Image (tube, coloured by chain):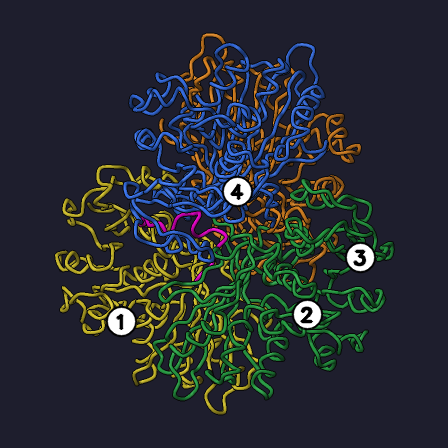
Chain colours: A yellow, B orange, C blue, D green
Amino acid sequence: MTAKGDKISIGILGASGYTGADLVRLLATHPNAEITLLTANTQAGKPLAAVYPHLGGLDLPDLIRGEEADWEGVDVAFCGLPHGTTQEIIAGLPERLKVIDLSADFRLTDTGTYAQWYGHAHRAPELQTQAVYGLTEHRRDAISGARLVACPGCYPTAALLLLLPLVAEGLIEADDIIIDAKSGASGAGRSVKESMLFCEVAEGLHPYAVAGHRHAPEIEQELSGAAGRPLLVNFTPHLVPANRGELLTTYVRLAPGRRVEDLRRALDARYADEPFVRLVPEGAVPATRHVRGSNFCLLGVFADRLPGRAILVSTLDNLVKGSSGQAIQNMNVMFGFPETTGLEQQPLFP
Amino acid sequence: MTAKGDKISIGILGASGYTGADLVRLLATHPNAEITLLTANTQAGKPLAAVYPHLGGLDLPDLIRGEEADWEGVDVAFCGLPHGTTQEIIAGLPERLKVIDLSADFRLTDTGTYAQWYGHAHRAPELQTQAVYGLTEHRRDAISGARLVACPGCYPTAALLLLLPLVAEGLIEADDIIIDAKSGASGAGRSVKESMLFCEVAEGLHPYAVAGHRHAPEIEQELSGAAGRPLLVNFTPHLVPANRGELLTTYVRLAPGRRVEDLRRALDARYADEPFVRLVPEGAVPATRHVRGSNFCLLGVFADRLPGRAILVSTLDNLVKGSSGQAIQNMNVMFGFPETTGLEQQPLFP
Amino acid sequence: MTAKGDKISIGILGASGYTGADLVRLLATHPNAEITLLTANTQAGKPLAAVYPHLGGLDLPDLIRGEEADWEGVDVAFCGLPHGTTQEIIAGLPERLKVIDLSADFRLTDTGTYAQWYGHAHRAPELQTQAVYGLTEHRRDAISGARLVACPGCYPTAALLLLLPLVAEGLIEADDIIIDAKSGASGAGRSVKESMLFCEVAEGLHPYAVAGHRHAPEIEQELSGAAGRPLLVNFTPHLVPANRGELLTTYVRLAPGRRVEDLRRALDARYADEPFVRLVPEGAVPATRHVRGSNFCLLGVFADRLPGRAILVSTLDNLVKGSSGQAIQNMNVMFGFPETTGLEQQPLFP
Amino acid sequence: MTAKGDKISIGILGASGYTGADLVRLLATHPNAEITLLTANTQAGKPLAAVYPHLGGLDLPDLIRGEEADWEGVDVAFCGLPHGTTQEIIAGLPERLKVIDLSADFRLTDTGTYAQWYGHAHRAPELQTQAVYGLTEHRRDAISGARLVACPGCYPTAALLLLLPLVAEGLIEADDIIIDAKSGASGAGRSVKESMLFCEVAEGLHPYAVAGHRHAPEIEQELSGAAGRPLLVNFTPHLVPANRGELLTTYVRLAPGRRVEDLRRALDARYADEPFVRLVPEGAVPATRHVRGSNFCLLGVFADRLPGRAILVSTLDNLVKGSSGQAIQNMNVMFGFPETTGLEQQPLFP
């Protein structure tokens, strides 16, 4: 289906997940975007408002099955499908269609690493080599010309916006990075699991996937690229009783001769002209409630009382800058819209 | 200070409360509005971002004391001051300035009722008679020509959008209305009280101000107007462990010969063309998470298994449609902007 | 398996639900009880600590399948099985075994009402007539001699402790009772449903099962018994974002000539000697956080500003006094232990 | 006032804080303890139930001012006063009275360190030298003969139970310890601060007191003792939206030649006979909900994928094992009661 006027026509594959819903929420106020196609296999035939009543005020096409999609006239497809299923589906889409993938399927460039962490050989390796890693602030040029953009995971986005400049400039010891991550429950998506019931999460707190989370190799891939040599990191996620929000506390050792102030200066300079990434003032502390519902990522740099070390903090909304918001930011880059279009919403607090 | 271009210049008195912050959040995306003045006596001298870091991405004037405000060039003042203090301050503002008050000071038209519920004689009774009660959907014409608009309380907004059409059309017994209300904690504002500490609210639930909440006379005033005779209602609020969101379950007796379907039809017809008020489909249930952060108010009508009775539900975000959003909606009406301008944000879920 | 010394031997059928876990938690400190048998069909073969790590400090038998249970030497069986499945299982237990059922299977004495609300004919109607409704404070004598006790639902317990004395003494109009109920998420048990995911409940609030909740006929059955004629009530439950706790706000009309003070006096007198039911002092407000984790039920009586009406509040922990705690209280009555044994735990706040 | 029979008589100074309330909750089921004196200066004259309605089922003396206390016949005083005020008050108590202090006033043995972190010279340095650091599992002998026990902070308890055996046995590099700590809101006590309002904490997450929390020198003091040389640690606390519960994720480097399995074995051996400290089975993950309301501390050991490193987890309820529970455990040691007396309550989940 074709969109009207100066709008591009948008299809969303797998619209019944939380990231799909947040894509719709944000695109609803995007002046150059019109959603013309929504798929969700298990919910096909229903209006989206039956699945997400909070979107009941919008005029949207009904949900259809993926194989029923008519891509004629559609300009871009957002893919919010489960990891592993996306590869073959994207491989079957029309070549002229731009694709923005929110799954993990095209994030890892090395097929061996992919197979090791995801448990099966990649099913569309030729596409994988074409995919651009969609960390907007660091891949803008490549994204603008890409056909297929693989949006980073939520944790890697928060980790890499913080660490890439520091590793690239050699300001920290890249072999001694410890990332203690905390996330709200929406990071687990809407899949129905006992461990994600309200009573299992509320008033609770615990680490999970210790030393085995799939976002670790993604962080390592990008940091290794910046360092010019293979790196490993400690990445330890925790589940906190909140809907949205992700905060990473990263413990690093300064490179010889470097001071905490150098880190602060480097990040400030790197992101001075970026609309969505911001170093908080000295004395202030990043908090998830300062980014909730918005596309912002906040960074903080603190001196450690251990000599030669620093404590770094980064926070974002996992469903926005960590997923749907960054995906739309990438769409803006790919289609030449001002990058903040549709993403001007301020954080919702309280 | 004057705003640029086709924008109106906006001052916010008492910007350090939650309603002040939500005014800023929403106005930030309003294409015809520019905030040029922010007062907050106890925080004067600071940038707003020091008080509300989530608004740190905006370019705003610093907070000043109320008496330092220069109203030259300002078109409209939003008043988010504590109840009781607003009266004299508004009385001292330039006559040409439009005023949208979010406090309770000008909601009650009867000065005796005001004195009884607020504990002191009204200090600007002449202004009180000029104030228009700002329930947009029901006072649009009067609001469009008003100088001073008294925005309804959050609970009365949810109660009246539901009940006014039913009482006016005589569909329910107006003397037998029981309103069981539930609200998140932001309804209490940012004032620092032991009873509002996290540990006192989380994992808890209780009624408060039983048979004595100040929103009761406000609801009664408007329903009495619709009924053409003095009415009393049962209004019983409860505090639930959530930030935002208000849901009222209202128990009514049908007027003789009336059926539940008549109520549903009346509300559907009354709000069919309203952008922000919506009856949910039969079988669906209004929930606070379906309106969070947005200017929507959802209504639901259910048959009771007690013969001759109905169960009605209304829900809104107390800080948006219940306060700052409705205030901006009124501003749009007063200045001739399309009524949804700046209020198109969809609910944030999860 | 037989317990040692002066302890009775206890089996729990369906120990993997939240009520099963809370039975174990409470019985762990009961000086006269020893758990010798735990069944949970889907988790058979595991230690209970694998299913409920918070009970990992206890020495307990492993979970087995129901049909593997050897009832030799067991004195009493607690049944925490899903509604509908309990009937045939209890019918198959040894006749000498005492049974305390936490399901809804034996609460409704009329098999027609049962079939209407539960969708199938009762499968053990002969047992149903023997079952004693286990509202301890009102059925103590019958419970002490019973073989099969049907513990009340959580909502009915809170409703009936409040309303039974008032209806029995004719202090309120029994045909005009409106019960607005609010419950935390554990009331839904540990069954895995999308609607009970953390993100679907947290920061939310909504009614459910409007005019159709199965606890309504149970409340009506008992109130009808007290009134001596068939009654209907309005019972409208809501889900609040908390783990535990249930609070009912009940709106009643006073009988002719009665005053609010009469209700207060009647409840105070009725429960003066009861260890677990307590009228809060005038001016105080019952709150779920005042009963969390304990076997207490708190009651409150408030004047309505509508003449001739009153607002009543009752609150309890749905898993304790509303389920496992009351079940143990009944066990104490059945075996002649002091009624508070094992139930002395004070509420956990914050 | 003297207690009856074989009970000791207990006074609580500063009973209106959360730790005071939790002392009362736990002591209420202690068979050898009777509370005979409760002080709370700002609430003097009231029953405790007016301040903590959840304790309204208990028979307790009214709150009095500290200076009104008659210590005749009292055996032990628990001190729950604010840091800094305790010193002089304890110095003024009768010498024969045993004192269990829950404040920070006597935790640091070095008066210089105390002055540096607490901003004033110590006011009872002679007492400070007599105080025994009340980490029960590691100071049992000294505690049993002590007159004054300084109970550890909540964070230090969780850190030291985990790290003391590992440092003492030389299993980890003691100079490279990073402790990322997360705590629920009750850790901040009941003091009324904007930052602890429900709306400021719920749906949020942030670090605080970065590189400057007062529990750091306490952890360092004890670890330095175990290592036999001065140590510094990184200790970074975060606030999570929960009432209770504290979880520390500690990142360590293994000593040369050591393997993760050695850490696991050492902790398992060290605490095999301890009733309250437990290493979780391999594959299991400690979670705050597994200790809520109980005196347990759970430990977990995980291999890091970074070679030569391990990830350690410890969790406890900050108000119980982190404060009031450990205080009662110390009382049991001091008076020769079995150590678990009054502390057998299992965790409350959900």
What whole-number distance in Å separates the C-alpha atoms at marks 2 and 1? 70 Å
Q: Which callout, 4 or 2, points to the residue nearer the camera?
A: 2
Asked if badge 2 and badge 3 are on a common chain, one would say: yes
Give the residue number, with chain letter if any, for mark 3.
D74
Q: Residues within 10 Å of mark 2 (few under 14, many from 20)?
A: some
Give the residue number, with chain letter if any, for mark 1.
A142
Callout 3 secondary element: loop
Give the residue number, with chain letter if any, for mark 2.
D144
- Amino acid under label 3? Val
Q: Residue furthest top?
A: B257
Quarter location, residue A318: bottom left
Q: Which callout, 1 or 3, points to the residue nearer the camera?
A: 3
Write down the region rendered in magenta. Answer: A191-206
Asked if badge 4 and badge 2 are on a common chain, one would say: no
- Amino acid under label 4? Val
Report if the CB atoms under discs 3 and 4 are less than 8 Å apart. Answer: no
Which chain letter matches label 2? Answer: D
Q: Is residue A192 magenta?
A: yes
Identify which residue, A35 or C48, lies in the foreground: C48
The residue drawn where x is 83% and y is 56% is D73
Callout 4 secondary element: helix
Report if the CB atoms under discs 4 and 1 are less than 8 Å apart. Answer: no
What whole-number distance in Å separates the C-alpha atoms at marks 3 and 4? 57 Å
Q: Residues within 10 Å of mark 4 (few under 14, many from 20)?
A: many
Q: Residues within 10 Å of mark 3 (few under 14, many from 20)?
A: many
